[in-house]
Image (tube, helix red, strand yellow):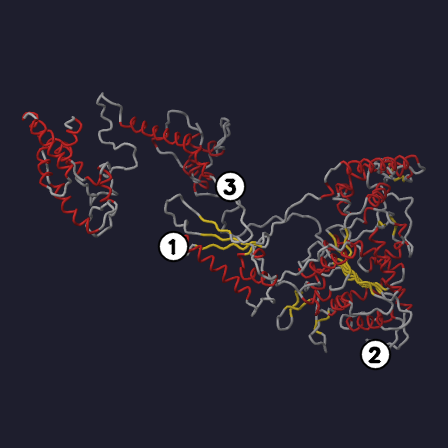
């Protein structure tokens, strides 16, 4: 029982303050205070324990007693513990045994431990003290940056005994990568065991809901629910009623797909929104079935929808073997036609030849240049 | 060396100003000889060394530059404007002369080669299916008649050939045959010719008119519908009409002149059935219709005379000629016109008496005594959008197609669109639609041969050339074929 580790634990325990902070570093403790800079109420420590309120009140005093008391050595603590009536028999037996062990410790060692705990307590005092935000600081310049990977305290001092803080941080980062890599390799494949085969919706499952999740994080959009349904699929509706339903849906009806799509995020919870949508669909169906006014004079409005006209290559233009043959045949016929015309009396009509022929046949005009100028007979056509 | 100057130029527009200012005394003797201000200013981005051009050393120039950002031609002068030098460009054209030159119609070209095989059109030729794919010439009298009716347009290429000639298309024969059938049955063929641009819609009207002239019909042609509805001609309300209709007397006079000139022979052979005392010179019954048309001398009486002539043509009597009533640019009359009533409300085109006369006939409200045809052609140039007309034509076309293949869907009105016009719908409810597209290869070949024989196309016309031009023209669109082969020669 009196192992050195146990002993050290017992020795250090009285020096511990703020046990509810646990492993949380001092900086986070300070942040608690900083988190509500605009609050007018005095900051108080939140109780993380999920115990009842009455129990909390009772424990509070004791806790504070415990935290305020300072034990310089384990003996004092054990004695104090034994005075407490709430501890169990087993604990009492343990404590008594340990106290006996402690009494066997030589006095010089006990004194050493005494002074060591005192020293640790004094040294750790500034870390435990909550740091208030400075009132007059400009943009909180003096505040340290929680986004950094190291705490920047004595960061640049090289003590020749260890890596620098940045290197440690880097190493930590690397460990994190590797951890996720291990997860990806060893654990992710196991997820496939949870996969369920896709079941197409049955005929009576007309409504199709869509939900959004941010994987447990809070998000203002995660309450939104979307429902889609095809009015033709609704059972028990006549054609006129279906048409009225489409008209009622207004711009929520997509005439290209024939689907009504509605969404709701007006309530705080997904379930509420889903219930609202379900009720709404029921209401719409009831309204569509109501024969009082079937909206026969109102045409179905599709102005909200831009129809996409699929651009299609004309079917006649596709080059098939048949079409190729047809084209070949046409070309052949054309060549034959040309050949026949070329061999006929008139021959092919040739624009150039026609012009040359016309020039040859044109009457020659002699033009006289007036006397005095150079006399020249020009041939004109 | 020039880098700092470049940057300065980039940063400040007035860098030149600072450079041109006299340098401070300390900067007078720099270590390196600086570029002259003018040189560095002139080519701030140049990488070549500055040429040794003499700097502008005149103090005047420097002062002007120092004044600020002065651009040439923007200087403010206070001493009165400089007199502009009047360059002598010769005599400027008189008012209207330019337009007349632009709109002139040339129907022959003496330099073009005469095509040996070209024959004149005879009366039955245009309705003869054997003539499909032939180019036939317009006889001189018909040319005059067509010219009087303004059937030729300045954009057409008549001026490139020795004699105006037309290609007989399948659609031509189809149309003229239907005209003949209608006249034989004393019915009215009501048809709208439509199609993409430069597919020959106006030319189809011209061919119909040619057929009518050759077969002694009376032809009344409204060559440009936009002249009637774009408020470019005078208008006056007609008495005793409710709702008020408006006559266009100046246009009516012009139209009467055209009718008289184009149809003089037929009108001389047709006689009035009733007495006309409302005319400037009253006419007894039994006088020729030409006498009515001849009275059209003044704007004031033009509308009365036109009405008298129209009533006589409509009078149910034997020996009346069939009538062709045609209009080009249909979309212009199928809308609210640009005219305003005295209360400054827009006047619908159908309230213009002349337009109403046409639309009534097109809608089937008028019966011609000897039958005839009412033709309208759409235009793709400067034509307003008329959603009703577009829809109605698409519907009629789909209905026609339905008779051949029952699966065709008839387009329906958009129930939420406001731009439809019920009056237009009523008129176009039962018209026939003739859609024009490209010509086929055989017709294209005939046309190319005619062009080549006229010396206007300098190639051998074989199937290869035909296929090339036909394809270039988007599948035988006539206007595009002209553009691809004829108009490349235009100088």
Please state the horizontal and vertical placement of residue B377, each as a whole percent of the image.
Answer: 76, 58
Say which residue label 2 marks.
B277
* Quarter holding residue A92: top left
- Tell me the subunit letter for badge 2: B
* Residue that appears at 50% across and 59% down: A281
Task: Between label 1 and label 3, give the one nearer the viewer.
Answer: 3
User: Considering only vertical position in the picture, is B101 above or below B490?
Assistant: below
Residue A310 in sight here: yes
Sort mark 3 into few (<14), some (14-19) or many (20+) by Cα contacts within 10 Å.
few
As drawn, which residue projects farthest toward the left? A107
Q: Position of residue A342 (x, y in %)?
A: 90, 35
Looking at the rendered structure, whether the residues under marks 1 and 2 are on a common chain is answered as no
Element under label 3? loop
> Which residue lies most toward the top here?
A160
**Quadrant of the rendered image containing residue B395:** bottom right
* Separation of marks 3 and 2 at Cα, in angstroms: 97 Å
Q: Which residue is disc 3 drawn over? A: A197
- Tell me which chain the residue with mark 3 is part of: A
Q: Nearer the viewer, mark 1 or mark 2?
A: 1
> Do labels 1 and 3 touch, CB within 8 Å?
no
Label 2: few (<14), some (14–19) or many (≥20) C-alpha neighbours in 10 Å: few
* Residue plotted at (43% across, 30% down): B3
Residue annotated with mark 1: A268
At label 1, counting other C-alpha atoms closer than 10 Å, the crowd grade (few under 14, some 14-19, many 20 or more) is few
CB under 8 Å between callouts 1 and 2? no
Q: Quadrant of the C terminus of chain A?
A: top right
- Out of B329 and A353, give the one closest to the viewer: B329
Q: CA distance from mark 1 to mark 2?
A: 90 Å
Residue occupying the point 32% across, 28% down: A170
Secondary structure of the residue carrying numbered label 2: loop
Dot 1 or dot 3: first in sequence order is 3
Residue found farthest to the right: A345
């Amino acid at each position: 029982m009196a192992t050195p580790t146990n002993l050290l634990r017992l020795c250090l325990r009285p020096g511990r303050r703020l046990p509810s902070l646990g492993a949380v570093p001092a900086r986070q403790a300070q942040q608690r205070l900083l988190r509500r800079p605009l609050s007018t109420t005095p900051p108080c420590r939140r109780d993380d324990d999920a115990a009842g309120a009455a129990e909390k009140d009772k424990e509070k005093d004791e806790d504070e007693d415990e935290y305020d008391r300072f034990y310089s050595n384990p003996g004092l603590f054990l004695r104090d513990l034994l005075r407490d009536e709430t501890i169990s028999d087993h604990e009492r037996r343990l404590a008594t045994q340990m106290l006996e062990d402690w009494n066997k410790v030589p006095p010089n060692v006990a004194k050493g431990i005494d002074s060591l705990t005192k020293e640790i307590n004094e040294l750790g005092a500034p870390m435990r003290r909550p740091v208030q935000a400075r009132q007059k600081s400009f943009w909180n310049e003096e505040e340290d940056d929680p986004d950094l990977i190291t705490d920047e305290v004595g960061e640049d001092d090289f003590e020749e005994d260890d890596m620098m803080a940045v290197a440690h941080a880097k190493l930590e980062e690397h460990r994190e990568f590797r951890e996720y890599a291990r997860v990806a390799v060893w654990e992710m494949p196991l997820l496939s065991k949870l996969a369920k085969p896709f079941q197409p919706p049955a005929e009576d499952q007309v409504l199709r809901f869509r939900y959004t999740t941010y994987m447990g994080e809070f998000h203002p959009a995660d309450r939104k629910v979307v429902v889609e349904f095809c009015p033709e699929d609704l059972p028990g509706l006549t054609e006129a009623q279906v048409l009225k339903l489409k008209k009622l849906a207004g711009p929520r009806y997509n005439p290209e797909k024939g689907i009504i799509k509605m969404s709701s995020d007006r309530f705080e919870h997904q379930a509420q929104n889903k219930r609202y949508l379900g009720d709404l669909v029921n209401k719409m169906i009831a309204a569509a079935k109501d024969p009082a006014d079937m909206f026969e004079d109102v045409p179905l409005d599709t102005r909200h929808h831009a129809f996409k006209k699929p651009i299609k290559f004309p079917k006649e233009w596709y080059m098939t073997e048949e079409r190729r043959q047809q084209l070949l045949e046409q070309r052949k016929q054309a060549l034959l036609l040309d050949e026949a015309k070329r061999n006929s009396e008139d021959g092919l009509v040739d624009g150039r030849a026609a012009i040359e022929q016309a020039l040859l046949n044109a009457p020659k005009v002699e033009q006289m240049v007036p006397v005095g100028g150079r006399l020249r007979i020009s041939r004109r056509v | 060396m020039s880098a700092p100057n470049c940057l300065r130029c980039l940063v400040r527009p007035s860098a030149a100003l600072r450079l041109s200012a006299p340098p401070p005394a300390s900067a007078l003797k720099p270590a390196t000889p600086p570029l002259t201000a003018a040189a560095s200013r002139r080519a701030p981005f140049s990488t070549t060394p500055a040429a040794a051009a003499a700097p502008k050393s005149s103090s005047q120039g420097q002062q002007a530059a120092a004044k600020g950002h002065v651009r040439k031609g923007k200087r403010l002068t206070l001493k009165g404007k400089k007199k502009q030098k009047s360059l002598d460009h010769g005599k400027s054209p008189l008012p209207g002369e330019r337009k007349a030159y632009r709109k002139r119609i040339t129907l022959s070209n003496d330099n073009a080669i005469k095509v040996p095989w070209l024959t004149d059109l005879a009366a039955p030729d245009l309705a003869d299916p054997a003539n499909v794919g032939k180019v036939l010439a317009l006889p001189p009298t018909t040319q005059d008649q067509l010219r009087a009716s303004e059937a030729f347009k300045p954009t057409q290429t008549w001026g490139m050939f020795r004699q105006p000639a037309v290609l007989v298309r399948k659609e031509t024969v189809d149309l003229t045959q239907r005209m003949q059938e209608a006249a034989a049955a004393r019915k009215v063929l009501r048809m709208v010719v439509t199609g993409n641009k430069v597919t020959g819609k106006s030319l189809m009207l011209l061919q119909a008119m040619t057929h009518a002239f050759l077969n002694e019909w009376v032809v009344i042609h409204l060559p440009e519908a936009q002249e009637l509805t774009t408020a470019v001609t005078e208008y006056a309300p007609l008495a005793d009409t409710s709702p008020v209709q408006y006559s266009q007397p100046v246009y009516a006079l012009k139209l009467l002149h055209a009718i008289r000139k184009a149809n003089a022979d037929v009108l001389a052979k047709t006689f009035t059935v009733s007495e006309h005392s409302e005319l400037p010179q009253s006419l007894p019954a039994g006088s020729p219709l030409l006498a009515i048309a001849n009275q059209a001398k003044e704007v004031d009486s033009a509308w009365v005379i036109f009405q008298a002539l129209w009533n006589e043509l409509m009078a149910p009597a034997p020996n009346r000629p069939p009538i062709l009533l045609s209009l080009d640019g249909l979309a212009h009359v199928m809308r609210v016109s640009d005219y305003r009533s005295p209360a400054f409300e827009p006047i619908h085109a159908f309230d213009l008496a002349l337009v109403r006369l046409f639309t009534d006939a097109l809608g089937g409200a008028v019966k011609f005594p000897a039958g005839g045809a009412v033709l309208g052609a759409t235009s793709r140039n400067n034509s307003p959008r008329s959603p009703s007309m577009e829809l109605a034509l698409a519907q009629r076309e789909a209905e026609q197609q339905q008779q051949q293949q029952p699966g065709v869907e008839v387009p329906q009105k958009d129930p939420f669109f406001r731009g439809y016009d019920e009056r237009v719908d009523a008129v176009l409810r039962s018209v026939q639609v003739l859609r024009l597209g490209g010509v086929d290869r055989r017709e294209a070949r005939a046309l190319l041969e005619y062009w080549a024989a006229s010396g206007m196309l300098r190639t051998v016309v074989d199937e290869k050339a035909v296929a090339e031009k036909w394809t270039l023209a988007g599948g035988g669109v006539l206007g595009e074929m002209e553009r691809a082969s004829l108009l490349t020669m235009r100088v």
